[in-house]
Amino acid sequence: MKTSYLLPYEWKKAGWIVFIPSIAIGLYLVITEYEPSVFDLRLPSIFVDDFIDSDKKLYGIVENNFLNEIVGVLAIISGLVVAFSKEKIEDEFISKIRLESLVWATYVNYGVLLITILFVYDFSFFYVMIFNMFTILLFFIIRFNWQKIKLNKSI
């Protein structure tokens, strides 16, 4: 019995259409710290930690600009669609490239994380950890597509 956990090939194009702009917008938001007030909302939150009052609660309502969360969710979901949609021709060699790329991305991601833990501190560490949520997916997508390009050139 052959089980495939990959998404249909047809989803890949839609994934790219959402993924590229969401990554670009996400980087723009982080670099410029732009937060349009239209996204300022009172939202339910799990584990509320108020820096000003030192008041910690398991849950509560917080004031937050929700744009970062929207862009982050779009980037993750569309990245997963891009990464794990079937190829037009999904054979054993593509499966091998996919597996090797995933292992490589995991090693590189955790290498970056170890270096970060050892050499990056304070609030800069927080920013690196935010980026680290996305890097394993980015590393995989870059490596997998690079390997496919190399394969196509060799044929």
Image (cartoon, rainbow, N blue to C red):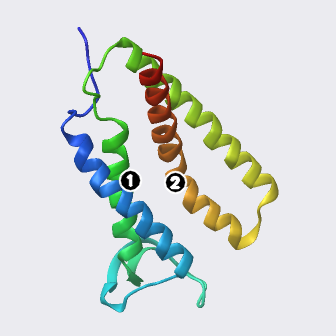
Residue 24 drawn at (x, y percent):
43, 65
Indicate whether 149 appears above or below 2: below
Residue 97 drawn at (x, y percent):
46, 22
Q: Residue at horizontal 52%, vertical 73%?
A: 30
State the residue in front, 54 or 151: 151
Q: Residue at horizontal 64%, vertical 39%?
A: 108
User: Looking at the rendering, in which quadrant would you find the N terminus?
Assistant: top left
Name the residue that disc number 1 marks: 76
Q: Residues within 10 Å of mark 1 (few under 14, many from 20)?
A: some
Residue 96 drawn at (x, y percent):
45, 17
Indicate whether 77 appears above or below 124: above
- The amino acid on which the numbered mark 2 sits, given as a three-letter code, is Met
- The amino acid on which the numbered mark 1 sits, given as a three-letter code, is Ile
Q: Is residue 1 left or right of residue 67?
A: left
Name the residue that disc number 2 marks: 133
**Number of callouts:** 2
